[in-house]
Amino acid sequence: MNDTSKGEGLRMAAADSMETRLARFDERLRALSEQVKKADADKQRAIDMATSELNKHLDELNHAHEIAKETLATYVPRETFDAKVGAVEERQRKSELAISNLMGRLWLLLLAAAAVAAGLAAAVVKVITK
């Protein structure tokens, strides 16, 4: 074998080696590309599942909020309650005062009527005894 054919053989071996390395590199690149695609698909599926779960929880929270609002609507604020109770107590106090005044006037009328009746009785007795 001469030097030219030896050099040619080395170049061919190097070219074969380079082609083999490129083929392995392409194969590895395809495998990595597939792994990335699979990872992206898995990530999207996880995002979709998380979104679905969050929407479910959000719906539950919205429903609970509506129930809480409806329940809260059945209660009276403390200030309103205190104002109404104060107004009722004031009306009761005024009513009791008016009843007390009327009772006092009634007793005066009864006493006056009793005095008139006693005076009439005395006059009748006086007329009868004369």
Image (cartoon, helix red, strand yellow):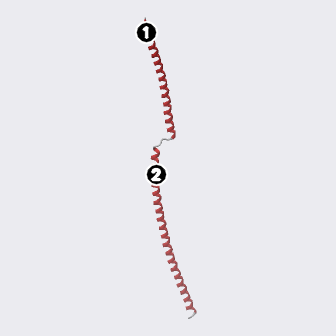
Q: Nearer the viewer, mark 1 or mark 2?
A: 1
Identify the residue under disc 2: 64
Rendered location of residue 45, percent (x, y) = 46, 65
Q: Of the residues under marks 1 and 2, which one precedes in the sequence?
A: 2
Viewer-proximal residue, 45 or 106? 106
Rendered location of residue 1, percent (x, y) = 56, 94
The answer to whether 128 is drawn above or below residue 104 in the figure is: above
Rendered location of residue 81, percent (x, y) = 49, 38
Viewer-proximal residue, 30 or 114? 114
Quadrant location of the C terminus in the rendered image: top left
User: What residue appears at the point 44 percent right and 52 percent down from the top-left corner?
Assistant: 63
The three-letter code of the residue at mark 1 reads: Val
For label 2, the crowd category at 10 Å Cα-Cα, with few meaning under 14, some 14 to 19 and many 20 or more, is few
The answer to whether 86 is drawn above or below residue 99 in the figure is: below
Identify the residue under disc 1: 125
Q: Are marks 1 and 2 in contact (CB under 8 Å)?
A: no
Secondary structure at numbered mark 1: helix
User: What residue appears at the point 48 percent right and 31 percent down from the top-left corner?
Assistant: 92
Q: Residue furthest right?
A: 3
Secondary structure at numbered mark 2: helix
Res. 21 mark: none
Q: Which residue lies furthest to the left in this view?
A: 128
Viewer-proximal residue, 21 or 60? 60
User: What residue appears at the point 47 percent right and 23 percent down from the top-left corner?
Assistant: 103
